[in-house]
Amino acid sequence: MGQYTAPLRDMQFVLHELLDVQTELAHLPVHAGLDTETIDQVLAEAGKFCEEVLFPLNQSGDQQGCSYSNGVVTTPVGFKAAYQDYIKAGWPALACDPEQGGQGLPVFVNNALYEMLNSANQAWTMYPGLSHGAYECLHAHGTPEHKKIYLPKLVAGVWTGTMCLTEPHCGTDLGLLRTKAEVQDDGSYRINGTKIFISSGEHDLAENIIHLVLARLPGAPAGTKGISLFVVPKFVPNAEGEIGERNGVSCASIEHKMGIHANATCVINLDNAHGWLVGEPHKGLNAMFVMMNAARLGVGMQGLGLTEVAYQNSLAYARQRLQMRALNGAKAPDKAADPIIVHPDVRRMLLTQKAYAEGGRAFAYWIALLIDKERSHQDEKVRAECAEWVALLTPIVKAFLTDNACEATNLGMQVLGGHGYISEWGVEQYVRDARIGTIYEGTNTIQSLDLLGRKVLGDMGAKLKKFGALVRDFIEQEGVKPEMQEFVNPLAELGDKVQKLTMEIGMKAMGDRDEVGAAATPYLRVVGHLIFAYFWARSARVALDKQATGDPFYQAKLVTARFYFAKLLPETAWQIRSARAGAKSLMELDEALF
Amino acid sequence: MGQYTAPLRDMQFVLHELLDVQTELAHLPVHAGLDTETIDQVLAEAGKFCEEVLFPLNQSGDQQGCSYSNGVVTTPVGFKAAYQDYIKAGWPALACDPEQGGQGLPVFVNNALYEMLNSANQAWTMYPGLSHGAYECLHAHGTPEHKKIYLPKLVAGVWTGTMCLTEPHCGTDLGLLRTKAEVQDDGSYRINGTKIFISSGEHDLAENIIHLVLARLPGAPAGTKGISLFVVPKFVPNAEGEIGERNGVSCASIEHKMGIHANATCVINLDNAHGWLVGEPHKGLNAMFVMMNAARLGVGMQGLGLTEVAYQNSLAYARQRLQMRALNGAKAPDKAADPIIVHPDVRRMLLTQKAYAEGGRAFAYWIALLIDKERSHQDEKVRAECAEWVALLTPIVKAFLTDNACEATNLGMQVLGGHGYISEWGVEQYVRDARIGTIYEGTNTIQSLDLLGRKVLGDMGAKLKKFGALVRDFIEQEGVKPEMQEFVNPLAELGDKVQKLTMEIGMKAMGDRDEVGAAATPYLRVVGHLIFAYFWARSARVALDKQATGDPFYQAKLVTARFYFAKLLPETAWQIRSARAGAKSLMELDEALF
């Protein structure tokens, strides 16, 4: 049951009308000649694959889950065939380096692909998703030999990848990790240890699995400065890149969990596994951060995808379910009752999902465009600036979009009432799948500390000020126009409040670092809303400009923008108060008295 | 895995120190002689049963679920034995009429029992929980003959009960229901139809199941004014109350659902089932509302129970899990890292659960005490007044406590990080079980409409003003005391805001009923916080008075009150803005443009 239609029209709106990627592409020589039509064709083709191949496997995949027997993981029926379709169509190569067999399309196209993959089937998407992260990491930090052996296979999707960080006693705190690597005479390493929570750690989709493993060298400094990164293939490839002998890496078990049942979450044992150093000794975390940042953006895309699919399904239900009469009198007097979409609170639930989906899409595609500019802009200064933007925005896209996804999927389920709670309709799965997003790849608390402690206060607000300038430019340009007052005024007000709040926390934090920890979570929500408010105001601008075309799409965009400012943005009133309330009420209670 | 300890100390605080039930009981002749010690002994005994018998079956019950075969439902291993223990100990009789074999204890004692039962095992508790609702309904509306046959069995727990309302095409909108009842020569009825989502509709715990079924008589008026209530036993009892022949009521299937796996959610077919009218023809909804109100309070108790158990489990984890150092420097330098309870955001998550559990306990026990006073107070005026209170507060206790439970259980899970998402630790089950609370027995949207539309605006705010007077009396008494300023000032401010907001919505609603629907959900959150703020301020008062005893319990209470006012109450800033933003942004979008 359930349904999914790729939201191509809104994707096109974001890319072409809001972000105007065509103008941006003109400054990215590697993408010269990439036109709007090609982008749209790729998205349409991807949408078809997601609708027709992946989505029908989502619910059955959840119900069957992965099975484990003697180290072998079997994915649900249909997963393997879908993966073969996926790699035959060349999707893993979409945004990869042409030198490695990639198609060299921009990251924003890949992000749009990933939004749709995640709407259709998050658990399945985690297999190719982690491979792409492994590709990024080896592309950035691998030796020429690693690149030659691994990248073409990852680009083609015939091999997949994983990230092996967590151990039973350490998740957030990687400084505690114990897995050991010892150098061999030939310069390779032997690795021993146990990793847990390894997504896609073992499966039957591909002929080889490339693990990127954090471990310690003998005599390494304690903590995070003594961690090195290794590439550990399930089957050791020979010099020609053909798979050879089985390595000492095995799956000891898979977890039973709340959601993403169809993705294998593995305990991985490394028994004298053969590995090769990636990057410099003891600097493994730096190298792994390439993959982790990609993964954090990827988790944001999961949140976006689930928000969209929950919206679509609850909307379909709200249109057909007849229950009660509209409060102002019957809307469908010929029927036994009105469709529940006439009720204000049902509309609140639908519009919240819609505003979070469309706002999230604008934000997530924008950060992808910034990554493209960071990598490929002709102007070095722009590249450096975009790198700063991406650093600032990554924790927000991860945490804000996944928090929103939990809210949106729960609202989607609520629209269905009791039918939402039973498995048949498929919506409760979205709630369970979305829930992991606030936890993995760094909990949302960690994201908020990264944002406030490192990215904002770490440079005395310099990066944040640049975003503030962008907002200010828009306000100055639009603030004088009567039709934009309703959007620009609350945006400007929130911008001022964020500035004041940041300074206030910065001052308090000088005396007490706990003030950062106490403010971080509400602070991230506030900054997330500032970004959403900026994009909703810009979207309203575009919609106002094009309203005369008569296309009702723009009317819907405008009304959704109004809803966002009326009902969702005011969350900041709470979060700002909560952030300002400081650390005292959190730290005062003695641990024993909880 | 997991743990549960009955929170007896806080229960005693609420009953004896905050609500001072002993003074109240002096005015309830039926409870004359019931002393503090007896109450505490009963609670301790109930706590033991919950800790030792029920809680150990919670996770295994979730994993096994109920199974269905040819109309027969089998509950998970251990459920039947636990139920036998439960009825042998006389727990179903606790608050029942002594004339029917009950023990005649107050409702507030029963509510405390139910909090613990739900903490320990919500799915199991739904079997006896619905029986108690059926008891209440038949006690209020049954004929003397019904009472004689059914009540002693329900009181003893040897038979259980259900509510059969929902049909495939109608849940919220009972006016649409189609199940038919036709009178027989002997004055009994034959009933035909299909009911869905019937909790505890079929099982193996008891020898008989008493269904309370809504159906239509021939020629009944359309809508809710043509619905009658019938008692339909699974096995038809003879005049001596012994079970006789199998009735035409059967379970066609059970649902697969997100949570409460161990409670059978049944499709119930009525095939010429033998039934007897309860109450007057066409006035079945009135009679059923006795059961529904009991059930709504019961769902609030589920929310409270899950909030408490999630808190306890995440607290235990936060104390033992070592990860990172405190931001102001190591707290446990002898260990590899500090326990995560040192981190401000972990404390935020724990204190939110704690404040919601303790605030919810005060609120829920208070409403139970009001029910006792409504039933048994010596002064008729007090009885009538308390009935009004209970009517006002029932939708709030249902919706506010279940929304809070969703928040609290999710925070509990978040404290555990990845370990929270896997089933092993048991916390993700609380999230799944809690999720149904906002849906069944009237969705929280319906509760909010009941509150704002019927209970508040329906009598021009008269009932609400009485609550306002209670708050004002407290403020006048305490507002002059310096040590109470931090609690009384925000409480007074919120009280004023609620008054203004109510008038504002009332004015707008005169012109547009959608304004009620648009404001109802945030309005309920605001009034819920007003109640919590009132009880947290009163709790602080008690704690301040007793601080000199040196009992650290009072210190914890005071700090938790401060946390509530600093971090949770400010949610009202958002909800008030959202309520005031009105209906326009919700209703503006054409249905086709969503």
Image: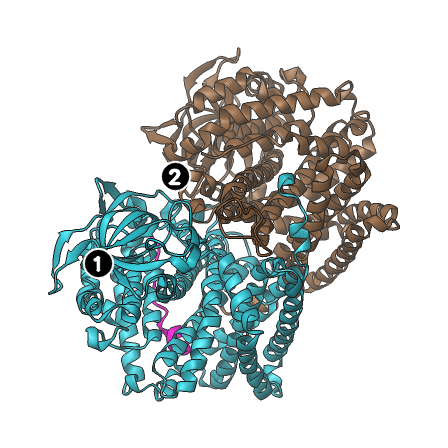
Chain colours: A brown, B cyan
**Would residue B241 appear left or right of B104 to someone viewing this image?**
left
Q: Residue at x 23, y 50 (%)?
A: B273
In front of the other: A474 or A524:
A474
Q: In which quarter of the image is the C terminus of chain B?
A: top right
- Amino acid, disc 1: Ser
Judging by the rendered image, the residue that carries numbered circle 2 is A255
Question: Judging from the image, what secondary structure is the residue with disc 2 in?
Answer: loop
Displayed quadrant of residue B252? top left
Distance from label 2 to label 1 (Cα)? 55 Å
Q: Which chain carries label 1?
A: B
Magenta stretch holds residue A355: no
Q: Give the range drawn in magenta.
A: B1-14
The percent coordinates of residue B472 (x first, y second) are 58, 83
The percent coordinates of residue B415 (x first, y second) are 48, 54
The percent coordinates of residue B162 (x first, y second) are 29, 57
**Would residue A292 appear left or right of B96 to someone viewing this image?**
right
- Amino acid, disc 2: Glu
In front: label 2 or label 1? 1
In front of the other: A571 or B400:
B400
- Total residue callouts: 2
Question: Judging from the image, what secondary structure is the residue with disc 1 in?
Answer: loop
In front of the other: B320 or A342:
A342
Q: Which disc, if any, is residue B188?
A: 1
